[in-house]
Amino acid sequence: MENEFAKNLGQRIATRRKKLKVTQEELAQKVGVKHPQIISQIERGEREVKAWELAKLAKALFIDVADLLAKGDLAVDQPVLWRVLPSKDREIKEALFLKHCKEYALLEDLSGSTRPRHFPQRPADPKSIDFRNVPKLADDIRREFGLGERPATSLEKTLEDQYGVKIWYDDLEEGSAASTIGDFGPAILMNRREAPWRRNYNFAHELFHLMTWTSIPPIQLQEDNTLWEKIEKIANAFASCLLLPADSVTAQVQEHAKENQIEYSDLIGIAREFGVSTEALLYRLLSLRLISKDTVDSILSDTQFRKMDRTTMSASWWDPPALPERFVRLAFVAYQKSRLSRARLAQLLETTLSGVTEILLGYDLNEREVHEKINLRSS
């Protein structure tokens, strides 16, 4: 019986390792065992796995210990839809992202947080959808989500707080953004290295994929490159229409224009006000027929314009925190309710036991605060 358990465990470890495209030598280094042969013996069920080794194996393979110990086949991970496929370690990036999403959902449950409303889905025929559908769809979503006339200022917060989108940042070499939907709900992986206005655009782009996830399944897009390219262009158009509402943008341009001309500084100011890049603004003005393609090309190739644009960037730049603020707050609440051990809290916050307090204070959370309770009147 023990031999059967060891073989089952070893097979699951081997299956997960191969899925992540990790060699036995690499796994041995991550776990801290001296020789790759030890991993080979474990995978063949020829060696007993110690408790500390099992914990490290699970961590290195981005999987729960309970999943490694379960019987039967490993569960299939949710598909992740990338803007640009990473050239290396794609499987590991996806596994880490999905692990964070599952932990995020667990914290919602442990903290007693009410799950946000169901994420809306929009019917869309992948074969027949075209750019004519985009402006109305963007306007409908902007109203439904209550994003107002400057959607970029509230889009991320609305997705996270009102619709339960798990937003995670990572330092991505490539693949500027990715999205998925699983049992944990909708989620977006964002490139921490990109400019804030580029991230705003990516959020709007990924929103299109999330709300058409059922109608345009990611597997279908991954298997049909022509369809993928078409849908990506439509998602880009949706992002532009969502973040730059036609009436609002037109009104701003007209307000700043004099004798049917507008200065570079005003164009840049409008882009910053709407939270988009100047390039995105110019192409939106082109789609609204407010400027010509020649004008767009001329402006973008003008070194003076580029210099002016760069000098205004620092004032609008902000870096996302190391961990999502909502994620940390949920972990803190679960810990305060004694539903999370301090060791587990440290693990989730990616720190040591001694580093927990400093991490929490960085998010204005003081674990020494006394949380008073009040009596409610009986009915």
Image (tube, rainbow, N blue to C red):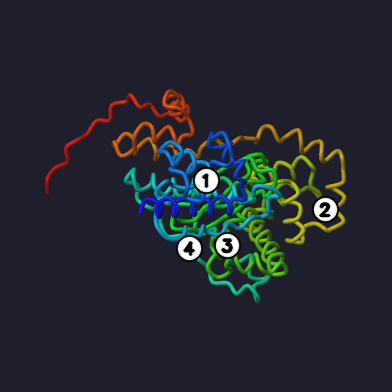
The one of 66 and 3 positioned closer to us in this rendering = 3
Question: Outermost residue toward the bottom?
Answer: 128
Q: Are marks 2 and 3 in contact (CB under 8 Å)?
A: no
The mark nearer the N terminus, 4 or 2, is 4
Q: Is residue 132 left or right of residue 37?
A: right
Q: Amino acid at mark 2?
A: Val
- The residue where tag 4 is placed is 120
Where residue 345 sits, quadrant-wise, is top left
Q: Are marks 3 and 4 in contact (CB under 8 Å)?
A: no
Where residue 244 sits, quadrant-wise, is bottom right
Above/below status of 306 relative to 87? above
The mark nearer the N terminus, 1 or 2, is 1
- The residue where tag 2 is placed is 296
Instruction: Determine which of the numbered discs, if any, sits on residue 139 in the image.
Output: 3
- The residue where tag 1 is placed is 41
Q: Are marks 1 and 2 in contact (CB under 8 Å)?
A: no
Q: Is residue 163 left or right of residue 276?
A: left
Quick one: SS at disc 2? helix
